[in-house]
Amino acid sequence: KRVFNSSSALHSLIGTQVLFIFILCILRVNSCTEPRRPYRFASAQQGEVEAGTRRKMKRLLSFQRYCHASRLLRGLVPHTPGSLHLLDDDYLGQAAHMLSKVGKWNFDIFLFDRLTNGNSLVTLMCHLFNVYGLVHHFQLDMVKLHRFLGMVQEDYHSQNPYHNAVHAADVTQAMYCYLKEPKLAEQLSPLDVFLGLMAAATHDVDHPGVNQPFLIKTRHHLASLYQNTSVLESHHWRSTVGMLRESRLLSHLPADMQDMEQQLGSLILATDISRQNEFLSTFREHLDNQDLDLQLASHRHFILQIALKCADVCNPCRFWELSKQWSERVCEEFYRQGDLERKFDFEISPQCNQQADSVPAIQIGNNYRFISYIVEPLFEEWLRFTEPSPLSQNMMGHLYKNKARWSRLRYAHTPSDTQTHSHAEEPRGGGGEGGDIS
Ligand SMILES: *[C@@H]1O[C@H](CO)[C@@H](O)[C@H](O)[C@H]1NC(C)=O
């Protein structure tokens, strides 16, 4: 009798669990069949369609245009997971699961961004700060940290197809993978890690979605402020310093704050693609002479600069599906700049003409050139530096495969169009002209 009772109790218990799991499944299926759109992106795009007046263009180019509205609201609108819909628990569970594999090169940042409801940058940075014990080491105030990261994420323009907070999160994830390289990991101080992650997260903050030549020819005030050199990068850095000071994140640290700001600047400014050759030849020289000494803070700083440069342009080293998405996004951003240039009678920049005869050929040509003249030379040296690590070999594998794929596409798209073909063949040098996506 006793056995019977307990087994029926067990049955009803199992029954309840099955029912519970069944309900969970329904909820899950519902949530999966309706993948949430990145809604901020969608509504911003709609706004973009209406653009067309001079006023709108001015607005587009007025940096930190959200500043007044959003800074005021920042204290009022809760951005915490608690305010999300009930079903988001499930998303956040999946996001948490993804974080357990954040050091893997095939990490899908687009998926992670959807699962975190557009908070990939904040979520990723908080996680990595905890992984490295940086909160404890620098005695950071979690509220200030959250506030600072929230400001950074929000100051990325979500309507930029490429230079948005997801790109920043992607670069941060890549940077984390590089910081973990055996050659580097043991030598890095907490300050190195802190600066490396911070620079990655902030390196494009408040990017307007147009490039430096555009700012110079439209006589944007930032171009004159920074005297036509590293205009965007300087702005990303100074914006970051502004937010650091506003959030008072580091205000409790001793007076070497200035030095931290300078180091952050030197890392962010290294992402200026027009300084590519300068960095590449110094890196090559060090490797040829085998004189890198990672005990020296200055050498570690140089390697952090290189690592950030690699992270910034690593899209072609990701597996094809991710890599292709990034290419499409950067092209879309170029086209939007081209549309602005057309509208306001400026000469259309080489990679920005959506009305050219063969858009795929141009797009492919740009990708191919960008890989051949910017990405490949840099990663070849990085491979050498890591002596070569499994990750570096993995990245080179993707790079060569993706390059071959673009190359095949190029020939498929230009069977008779010899003009476009020879144009695409022509080297553009390592400058920022060809495929400036930093
Ligand atoms: C920046 O470029 C603009 C346009 O070419 C030029 O008029 C201006 O003098 C330049 N400013 C500096 C500081 O070089």
Image: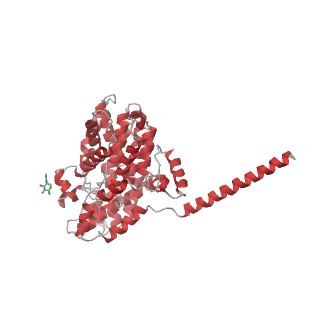
Task: Please identify the quarter of the rendering in which residue 266 is found.
Answer: top left
Task: Depth check: give the residue in front, 229 or 141.
Answer: 141
Task: Depth check: give the residue in front, 78 or 42.
Answer: 78
Residue 258 vs 435, above or below: the answer is above
Task: Depth check: give the residue in front, 422 or 185.
Answer: 185
Task: Please identify the quarter of the rendering in which residue 67 is found.
Answer: bottom left
What x and y, as percent, mark residue 357?
Answer: 30, 70
* Left or right of residue 227, residue 25 in this image: right
Residue 347 vs 268, above or below: the answer is below
Q: Residue at x 38, y 31 (%)?
A: 187
Q: How is the image coloured?
A: secondary structure
**In this rendering, does residue 265 appear at all?**
yes
Question: Which residue is situated farthest in the right direction here?
Answer: 1
Q: Residue at x 49, y 57 (%)?
A: 84
Residue 187 vs 415, above or below: the answer is above
Task: Depth check: give the residue in front, 231 or 128.
Answer: 128
What x and y, as percent, mark residue 3?
Answer: 84, 46
Number of residue marks: 0
What x and y, as percent, mark residue 50?
Answer: 32, 71
**In this rendering, does residue 388 appear at all?**
no
Ligand 1 sits in quadrant: bottom left
What x and y, as percent, mark residue 421?
Answer: 31, 62
* Left or right of residue 392, residue 211 in this image: left
